Image (cartoon, grey):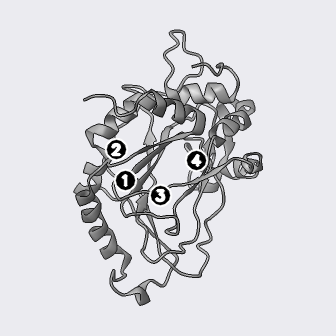
Amino acid sequence: MTAALNAAHIRQFIDEGYVILDNAFSPELAEQGRRLLWKDTGCSPGDPSTWTQPVIRLGDYAQEPFRKAVNTPLLHVAFNQLVGEGRWLPRNSLGTFPVRFPGPDEPGDTGWHVDASFPGEEPGNFLEWRVNVNSKGRALLMLFLFSDVGEKDAPTRVRIGSHLDVAQLLAPAGDAGISVTELAQKLNVTANRQEVLATGKAGTVYLCHPFLVHAAQPHCGTTPRFMAQPPLLTAKEFSLHRPDGDYSPVETAIRRGIQVQPYNY
């Protein structure tokens, strides 16, 4: 298969921290997935009076529509281009779905953050999970849109270029990294970054650098939003000092953030 991403896409990923793949999976798969998700919400698609919570979190989904959605040829080629061939693990599921519903109630989960990638001393305590400058365990942050998402439909907020700031924050901590709680307290350094909203048609996938700062928001629209936010896991740990210079775009962005790599990639 030909390349999923061109040179401009790769530059955008390194500079801004994300690229958008339209039609990464089919609208038919998205519709099949929504039917399964609606059933598990316990809500009725045609009766807004049953939408009583701002967000319902559904467990790991590995049924056929989800397996197929995350394993399209287009996505696999893009993974190779961004992470490196043989450096990522195929997924057989799409993880959890935070289904967001319209309404005036605050969802209570709208803080800016970076997703954790490996456990601390207490693996059961998610607040102590960690991130390090090599992005141990996590190759990409991915946003899979299973419904059409407009500006009022609780699209994920993203701070453009914030992955470069996060690399600088993580560098002094070395391999040990820092907890996501501690990191969240430092993310005010990204507050001046421009925001973009992760909108798009069902079947759109945002492929994001694992250090990209992002946040949820309340749903001000009329149609519930269905989106998965799974990680792409690493098969081989990233390296910021490769003798052969064969750096992936993920690694190149980190090196730029910590000022190891010059701008003219």
Sequence-wise, the earlier of marks 4 and 2 is 2
Q: Is residue 25 toward the left or the right of residue 260 in the image?
A: left
Whether residue 239 is visible here, answered yes or no, is yes
Q: Amino acid at mark 1?
A: Leu
Q: Position of residue 216 (x, y in %)?
A: 57, 62
- Which disc is residue 91 wearing? 2
Who's the residue at 38% across and 76% down the image?
41
| Element marked by disc 2 | loop
Q: Are marks 1 and 2 in contact (CB under 8 Å)?
A: yes
Question: Mark 4 highlights which residue?
Answer: 116
Q: Is residue 88 above or below residue 214?
A: above
Q: Amino acid at mark 2?
A: Arg
| Element marked by disc 4 | loop
Q: Is residue 87 above or below residue 261?
A: below
Who's the residue at 64% across and 32% down the image?
133
The answer for how far apart the CA atoms under marks 3 and 2 are is: 23 Å
Q: Amino acid at mark 4?
A: Ala
The answer for how far apart the CA atoms under marks 4 and 3 are is: 23 Å
4 vs 3, front mark: 3
| Element marked by disc 1 | loop
Sequence-wise, the earlier of marks 3 and 2 is 2
Sequence-wise, the earlier of marks 1 and 3 is 1
Q: Quadrant of residue 4?
A: top left
| Element marked by disc 3 | loop
Q: Nearer the viewer, residue 111 or 122?
A: 111
Question: Mark 3 highlights which residue?
Answer: 199
Q: Position of residue 18 (x, y in %)?
A: 52, 41
